[in-house]
Image: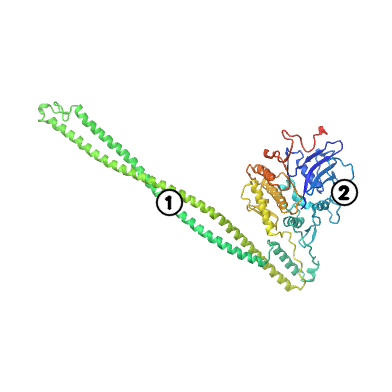
């Protein structure tokens, strides 16, 4: 399949220094301050590809002609030349960089005309080898030739559309163009143009059944519009049988894993109960040890006092003759051996109390020793239980890792079964309506409704996978599970529609959509212009106080770096990125980088400063 590459964009004017920017065949980055002409580059490229208008800015005063150089993948080069505000585009079959001095090889109108080849749309489609490809104009089956502007809207994305809530597929945001835009996207994804269909007679409703048939046709159209799978009822029933068998296997595996997990949780609860009882017993033992330690100190203090009393009796002369130190009797009033009896009774009392206290202390020490052994046993058992807890937790984690894909498979199978059952129900409803319609009229059946959203499911799944891989490569937060609904043309990520996301996330998702489409169609040799122009695709963070941001979303800091790295390492053709923020230093030397009005940059903007004119 032929591709185009943008080579340069050049503005010329009498007495004006040329304003030009070169594009790499791989990645080109244009960045810098606001109001330096970055977005003007994207608008000018789109203008040269057939857009009707290019809004003027003060800096373009005096410039009268625009040149856009292009190179074809077969080696040819040509240049498009258009006057600022002009209705015609001239084609020169070589690389032109200055005001043309020779007649153009072709002179074309900027507006598409299916009946004439003298317009830029038919010319570019012919270069790409896809002129005459048919797309659907309406649900009644009317077809018309492809317009290059339909491709340009998917490849050249300005900053407004980048963050717009409308689907990237619906570039014009006009409901009247929705059928055509869906049909264009179907052509790009599947590579299959719309077949010619016989036109239905305009007076069918009046001739056969009138109002009743019109109502039934409307109901049939509605039912068919809800169909999403390009398969018949027999194939759907086969799918349903296969899904049911697979679901039974997955359910059985899930039940077995759930029983194992329940057993592990039961063991864990048992360990927790034992651990709680052991902890309570350990607390009781520690409290007893604390109390017994105080009692031991008391016994030891009592023994020390008794020893002191025994020693004091000798030191204080309790055993000498004279006035009795116990009763105060004089010697001549004392019985024989009076002091000896008193001293003997004191010594006996001290000795008896000492023995008693010593026995109590020994008993206490035995109890303390026993409690300490219990405490050691409790601690040893606790350490063993910690190992059991760790082992149990590891088994639970391993089991959860096994359960997760099983649960995911079960969910996907249930969703798939639900879709197939819904499709079968719609087919049954359509059959009933067709039977009712046949009973009301014997007219020839009208041609089936055209389906611009009837993209083969395999192509949709392939495109979803490509966007998922792109988002993963850019490190966009989340699981990045991508779903594209051909009926609504809505792109959803992780179950959340793109239109409901914040501005920054809408922009990065639109960029992933455009890059993935180019990457997929280039790899599969399907229709694509060959280049992508993205204006402000990477907004890493929008402050909550930003009045334009209803639901600000925070991205990881490395999204921008991985965005550029992926475009370099996994090229999708030519990509031109226009951004305010400075790209990562890692792309220097590997991509063409133009810096406008930043420190160290060679140019202040797209147009030269006025003092240099």
Q: Position of residue 413 (x, y in %)?
A: 60, 60
- Residue 540 visible, this orientation: no
Indicate which label's residue lies in the foreground, 2 or 1. Answer: 2
Q: Which residue is at 84% across, 36% downward?
A: 16
Q: How many marks?
A: 2
Q: Position of residue 607 (x, y in %)?
A: 79, 37
Mark 2 to mark 1: distance in Å? 87 Å
Side of 430 relative to 288 (left or right): right
* Nearer to me, 595 or 538: 595
Label placed on residue 107: 2
Side of 404 relative to 514 (left or right): left
| Mark 1 surroundings within 10 Å by alpha-carbon count, few (fewer than 14), some (14 through 19), many (20 or more) | some
Q: Which residue is mark 1?
A: 271
Q: Position of residue 537 (x, y in %)?
A: 70, 45
Residue furthest to the top in view is: 322
Colour mode of the rendering: rainbow
Does dot 2 land on a helix, a strand or a loop? strand
Q: Quadrant of residue 183?
A: bottom right
Residue furthest to the front in view is: 75
| Mark 2 surroundings within 10 Å by alpha-carbon count, few (fewer than 14), some (14 through 19), many (20 or more) | some
For the residues bearing labels 2 and 1, Cβ distance under 8 angstroms: no
* Nearer to me, 400 or 276: 400
Q: Quadrant of the C terminus?
A: top right
Q: Quadrant of residue 315?
A: top left
Q: Quadrant of residue 235?
A: bottom right
Q: Which residue is at 39% across, 45% downward?
A: 379
Q: Position of residue 91 (x, y in %)?
A: 85, 47
């Amino acid at each position: 399949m032929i591709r185009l590459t943008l080579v340069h964009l050049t503005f010329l004017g009498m007495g004006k220094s040329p304003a030009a920017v070169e594009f790499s065949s791989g990645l080109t980055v244009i960045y810098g301050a606001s109001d330096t002409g970055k977005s003007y580059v994207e608008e000018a490229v789109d203008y040269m590809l057939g857009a009707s208008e290019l809004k003027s800015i003060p800096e373009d005063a005096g410039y009268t002609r625009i040149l856009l150089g292009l190179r074809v993948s077969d080696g040819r080069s040509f240049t498009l030349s258009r006057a600022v505000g002009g209705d015609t585009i001239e084609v020169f079959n070589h690389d032109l960089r200055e005001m043309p001095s020779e007649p153009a090889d072709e002179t074309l109108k900027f507006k598409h005309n299916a009946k004439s080849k003298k317009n830029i749309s038919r010319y570019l489609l012919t270069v790409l080898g896809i002129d005459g490809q048919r797309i659907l104009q309406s649900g009644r089956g009317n077809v018309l030739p492809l317009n290059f502007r339909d491709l340009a809207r998917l490849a050249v994305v300005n900053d407004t559309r980048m963050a717009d809530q409308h689907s990237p597929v619906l570039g014009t945001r006009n409901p009247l163009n929705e059928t055509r835009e869906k049909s264009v996207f179907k052509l790009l994804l599947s590579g299959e143009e719309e077949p010619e269909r016989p036109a239905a007679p305009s007076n069918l409703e009046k001739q056969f059944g009138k109002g009743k048939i019109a109502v039934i046709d409307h109901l049939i159209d509605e039912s068919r519009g809800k169909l999403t799978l390009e398969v018949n009822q027999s194939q759907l029933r086969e799918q349903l049988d296969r899904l049911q068998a697979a679901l039974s296997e997955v359910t059985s595996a899930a039940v077995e894993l759930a029983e194992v997990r329940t057993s592990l949780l039961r063991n864990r609860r048992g360990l927790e109960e034992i651990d709680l009882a052991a902890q309570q017993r350990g607390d009781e033992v520690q409290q007893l040890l604390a109390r017994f330690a105080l009692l031991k100190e008391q016994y030891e203090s009592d023994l020390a006092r008794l020893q002191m009393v025994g020693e004091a009796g000798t030191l204080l002369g309790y055993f000498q003759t004279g006035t009795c130190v116990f009763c105060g009797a004089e010697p001549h009033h004392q019985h024989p051996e009076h002091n000896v009896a008193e001293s003997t009774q004191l010594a006996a009392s001290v000795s008896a109390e000492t023995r008693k206290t010593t026995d109590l202390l020994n008993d206490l020490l035995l109890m303390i020793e026993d409690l300490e052994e219990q405490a050691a046993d409790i601690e040893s058992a606790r350490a063993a239980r910690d190992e059991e807890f760790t082992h149990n937790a590891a088994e639970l984690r391993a089991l959860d890792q096994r359960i997760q894909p099983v649960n995911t498979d079960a969910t996907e199978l249930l969703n798939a079964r639900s879709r197939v059952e819904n499709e079968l129900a719609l087919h049954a409803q359509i059959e009933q309506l067709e039977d009712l319609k046949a009973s009301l009229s014997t007219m020839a059946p009208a041609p089936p409704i055209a389906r611009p959203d009837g993209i083969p499911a395999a192509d949709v799944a392939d495109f979803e996978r490509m966007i998922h891989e792109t988002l993963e490569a850019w490190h966009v937060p989340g699981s990045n599970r991508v779903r594209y609904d051909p009926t609504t043309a809505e792109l959803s990520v992780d179950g959340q529609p793109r239109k409901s996301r914040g501005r920054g996330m809408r922009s990065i998702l639109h960029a992933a959509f455009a890059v993935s489409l180019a990457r997929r169609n280039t790899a599969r040799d399907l229709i694509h212009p060959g280049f992508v122009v993205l204006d402000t695709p990477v907004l890493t963070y929008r402050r909550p106080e930003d009045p334009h941001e209803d639901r600000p979303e925070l991205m990881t800091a490395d999204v921008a770096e991985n965005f550029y790295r992926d475009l370099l390492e996994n090229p999708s053709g030519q990509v031109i990125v226009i951004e305010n923020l400075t790209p990562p230093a890692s792309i220097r030397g590997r991509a063409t980088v133009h810096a406008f009005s930043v420190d160290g940059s060679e140019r202040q903007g797209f147009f030269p400063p006025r003092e240099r004119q």
